[in-house]
Each structure stands twice: as structure tokens, then as C-alpha cells.
Image (cartoon, grey):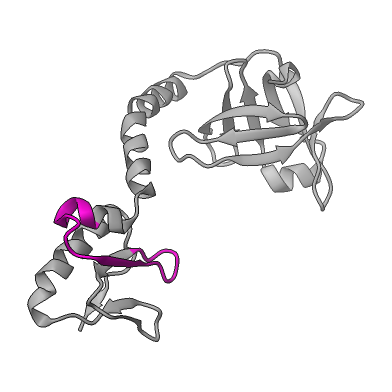
Amino acid sequence: MDPRLVGTWDADSTDQKTIQRYGHTSMIFRPDGTLAYMDKDRGKSSVIALTYRTEGDVIITDQPSSPREERIRYVFNREGKMEFPGPEGASRFVRTSADYPISREESEFRKRTEAARPRREEAATLAGASSKDLWNQVWGDVNQVHEFRIPVSHRAAHPSTWPQAIHDARSPYFMRPRGESFVLGVTAMILGKKGFLRRNPKGE
């Protein structure tokens, strides 16, 4: 962790390009690795609760409520301002305080996010499982199944005896005996609930 980051940083109001890109925003870096990104351009402040760490000259942020890492390179110029270099020029932030306050709203939000972490981790585990694994959990491994993902957003399992095809609209569907429609319907429902199916497969 870079101790030089700790404190409150405001978008440099004297730099027009920075204001155009970031607006009148503030960032509060804390020594415990939490980061608050505050947007003050919409009549009232809105806060995004993040975490951060540093690797060399890169700040790596993550949003606990919707995990996804973002990376940005930073440097300090001769005036002590923090700059984010980019192809269209650097954006600058000014350290306005060594303090790193936390509002009651942010504190309560972080507590709720932490309390929900086990559910998010369980969902991530389910999302990491293949639809074939889910099929076997429900129906057992007696029947051989195939899995396909075309495009990547579509993930489904079907008995190996059912040929698969793709409509012109890129929607997947199965060719199966009419009597097995119940199996297809239940499987599609389970996979859809788990987030594996973005479109419902069509049985023909």
C-alpha cells in the first residue's frame, strides 16, 4: 500500500480536462484499504464504496458489491498532485486533506455488503460450475450429456441423443423426442435460475 495516497483527493478544479472527464469528484483513500469515490455533480453527493491496493505505480480498485478489478496508473507531479496518465493527457487530483472520514451511510453500506459476502461467494461458486455438472446434480450421471456454449453467454446441457442446432438469430435449440420435453423444460428452468441461460432454448 502506498501511504502517499491516504487522505482526501479532489479533482483539480483548475484543470478543465480533468473536470470534463471526472466532474467534481473526490476520492478518499484510507489506510485499511477502503476507498470512497464521491460524485458531487448531481445536486447531492453519491458515494461508491470500493477497496484498493497498489502494485508498483498502479492502483487496483474493486467494488465488493459487484466484484471487478480496475487498474489505473498513477504518478505524483512536482506540485504534489496525483496524475492519471492517459492517451489524451493526464487527469489531476489535489490532496485537500490528510483526513479520511467515513460517512454513516457508507459505513452501513459496507456492513451490509460484508454480511452478504457468503451469498455472493456461493453464487460465484455456482456460476463457476458447468451446466453439465448441474445436470448431473439434478438427474444423476446415468445419461450421457453434452454441453455447448454458443455464443459464450449460452450454456446448456442436453442428452447426447438430442442433436443441437442454432437459429439464424443465434439462439440455440435442441431437437428431441416429444416425450422428453419435460426434462428439457425443467433443465432449462434450473439453468436459467442459476444465470446460465440468457435466452430460453426452443424445443422442436
Q: In this rendered view, identify the residue nearer to me: 50 or 153.
A: 153
Q: Quadrant of residue 204?
A: bottom left
Q: Residue at 44%, 18% (x, y): give it.
A: 104
Q: Quadrant of residue 143?
A: bottom left
Q: In this rendered view, identify the residue nearer to me: 18 or 30.
A: 30
Provide residue 198's location: percent of width, then percent of height: 34, 64
Boundaries of the magenta span: 135-155
Quadrant in which the N terminus appears: top right
Q: Does residue 153 belong to the magenta stretch?
A: yes
Which residue is at the far bottom? 168
Q: Residue at 63%, 27% (x, y): give it.
A: 53
Q: Is residue 7 above or below residue 71?
A: above
Q: Does residue 105 belong to the magenta stretch?
A: no
Q: In this rendered view, identify the residue nearer to me: 133 or 43.
A: 133
Q: Residue at 73%, 43% (x, y): give it.
A: 19
Q: Residue at 38%, 42% (x, y): give it.
A: 124
